[in-house]
Image: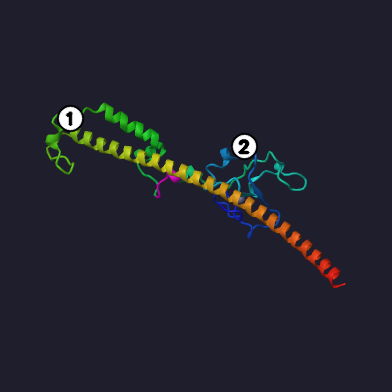
Amino acid sequence: MSTTHCAIENCRTTILNKTSGISFHPCPQSTEMRNRWLKVLKNRCSMLDWAKSRICSKHFENKYFDSHRRLRENAIPTLFAQQPKLSNKSMEHPKAPKSKVDRFLNKLTQAELTADIKMSMARLKEPINLDDFITDDLRCRHDTPVEAQLWLMVKKQEHLNNRLMDLVVQTKKHVEILEHNMEEAKIAKRENDQNVESLKYVVKCLQEKHATLEEQIEILTAVESR
Ligand SMILES: [Zn+2]
């Protein structure tokens, strides 16, 4: 996030390279407008900070500007270059998938995949005497029935998925903690700033007092020397 670059992904407008007529605009203050902005921007900004991010005027229709080219309160960014959205981009593999299965898999969400694996697991019956077919390094012996091989594969996949989901939950928690810490740091900074301000005021008062005292001393010295 930056105050000098447009926050829209793929937009290259910056404070430095902008042509005349292009302006930079902060995000709205009200929760209602922020929610409306979020709907259109969530897949178009890799990072959106309500306080710092700026959106350039290329993304606003003319109707959202008043006669002084000021952005109206109800303005919503609606103009974007024809580029793939972030969500699609992150779902795509670096190389375009060739098979039908790959294409379908790419469309599935993590939750859908997990549910699918769980369902497959529920449909498959644990093979009898499975232990006899499995080696110590969790592989199948060459004479293992196909059903048992499949069962083991899906079981491994399920296990992996559970671990990944645990990681996702953990990461989410970490993000929450980080956000909380950031919020606390912000509050501490604000309090600090306030303290600095009041100290500055005290210093100013003391300086004035000092000046008054000096004047008084001058008067007293003058009276004394007379
Ligand atoms: Zn822009």
Q: Quadrant of the C terminus?
A: bottom right
Q: Position of residue 156 (x, y in %)?
A: 25, 38
Query: In the picture provided, is 19 more to the left or to the right than 152?
Result: right
**Residue 116 shows in this picture:** yes
- Dot 2, crowdedness within 10 Å: few (<14), some or many (≥20)? few
Callout 2 amino acid:
Thr
Q: Position of residue 53 (x, y in %)?
A: 59, 49
Labelled pair 1, 2 in contact (Cβ < 8 Å): no
Residue at mark 1 to residue at mark 2: CA–CA distance: 56 Å
Q: Which residues are magenta?
A: 90-94
Residue situated in front as seen by the camera: 46 or 222: 222
Secondary structure state at the residue bearing disc 2: helix
- Dot 1, crowdedness within 10 Å: few (<14), some or many (≥20)? some
Q: Which residue is mark 2?
A: 31
Above or below: residue 129 compared with residue 53: above
Q: Colour scheme used in the picture?
A: rainbow
Which mark is nearer the camera, 1 or 2? 2
Q: Which residue is mark 1?
A: 127
Magenta: main secondary structure: loop
